[in-house]
Image (cartoon, rainbow, N blue to C red):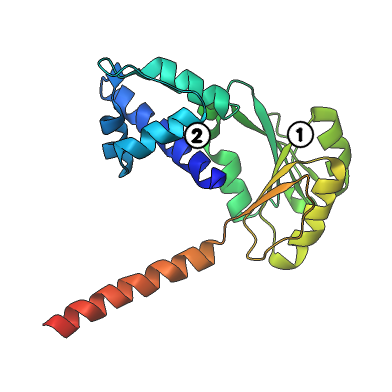
Amino acid sequence: MFERTIIRICRYKNALYRLKKLGFVRVFSDNIADAVGGTPSQVRKDFSMFAISGNKRGGYKVDELLEKIGSLLGKDQVCNVIVVGAGHIGLALMNYGGFEKENMTIKAAFDIDPAKFSIDPDIPVLPLLELADFVKKENIRVGIISVPDMAAQHVADLMISAGVKGILNFAPILLRSNDDTVIKNVNLELELENIIYFVNACEKSVDERL
């Protein structure tokens, strides 16, 4: 339940950024609900869980609401992140420019392939053996895994033993963890298979009606 609430809060934040770009200075729960495909009552309920309140007549001030949500999500502090696996997904994440606006910075990537090592001043690619020291030195709390599935658990174990508290896993395998570390799995293949299934099912349904 709490996890779903946080997911909705993140969606509200993204919607507020869009509404702000459109010129909104104040918004109502109806505006936010329309933007995310939810209900005004759910928006108000989610906000009330974190003592975020608006004005019945004036609604919410967009900037103030974004500041409160940012503080709730820890966006008022910079979160340093590492990536393990400098392949296609890893490189795409390293080159993505959207993390900075969310106060997230990829400090370094790690790999076992010497051909991928780099001393780039922005995001260096370092040997995996240096991960533990780097995590402790830079106070890294979040890591991203983008390695083949056979190596993913080993990488997760390295991160956890080094002190990483949150892991986003792109490898197509469920990872073991401990009670102190949060792991989120993003299986791109599975998600794509789901989409293909529903597209095919939709087309089959249309054909049957014709």
Spot occupied by residue 70 in the image (x, y as percentages of width and height): 52, 24
In this rendering, position of residue 13 left or right of residue 199:
right
Residue beneath the point at 69% across and 58% down: 147
Question: Closer to the N terminus: mark 1 or mark 2?
Answer: 2
Up-down relation of residue 194 to residue 108 (above or below): below
Nearest the viewer among 105 and 16 is 16
Nearest the viewer among 110 and 29 is 29
Residue beneath the point at 37% across and 39% down: 42
Residue beneath the point at 28% across and 19% down: 56
The disc at residue 123 is none
In this rendering, position of residue 24 left or right of residue 13:
left
Mark nearest the camera among 1 and 2 is 1
CB under 8 Å between callouts 1 and 2?
A: no
Q: Which amino acid does label 2 sit on?
A: Gly
Residue beneath the point at 49% across and 26% down: 69
Spot occupied by residue 95 in the image (x, y as percentages of width and height): 56, 40
Could one spot residue 14 in this view of the protein?
A: no
Secondary element at image label 1: loop
The disc at residue 98 is 2
Spot occupied by residue 200 in the image (x, y as percentages of width and height): 31, 76
Q: What residue type is labelled 1?
A: Ile
Mark 2, residues whose alpha carbon is within 10 Å: few (<14), some, or many (≥20)? few
In this rendering, position of residue 174 left or right of residue 129:
left
Could one spot residue 72 in this view of the protein?
A: yes
- In whole angstroms, how far apart are the C-alphas of marks 1 and 2? 19 Å
Residue at numbered disc 1: 140
| Residue 83: quadrant of the picture | top right
Spot occupied by residue 36 in the image (x, y as percentages of width and height): 33, 41
Up-down relation of residue 63 to residue 99 (above or below): above
Up-down relation of residue 75 to residue 113 (above or below): above
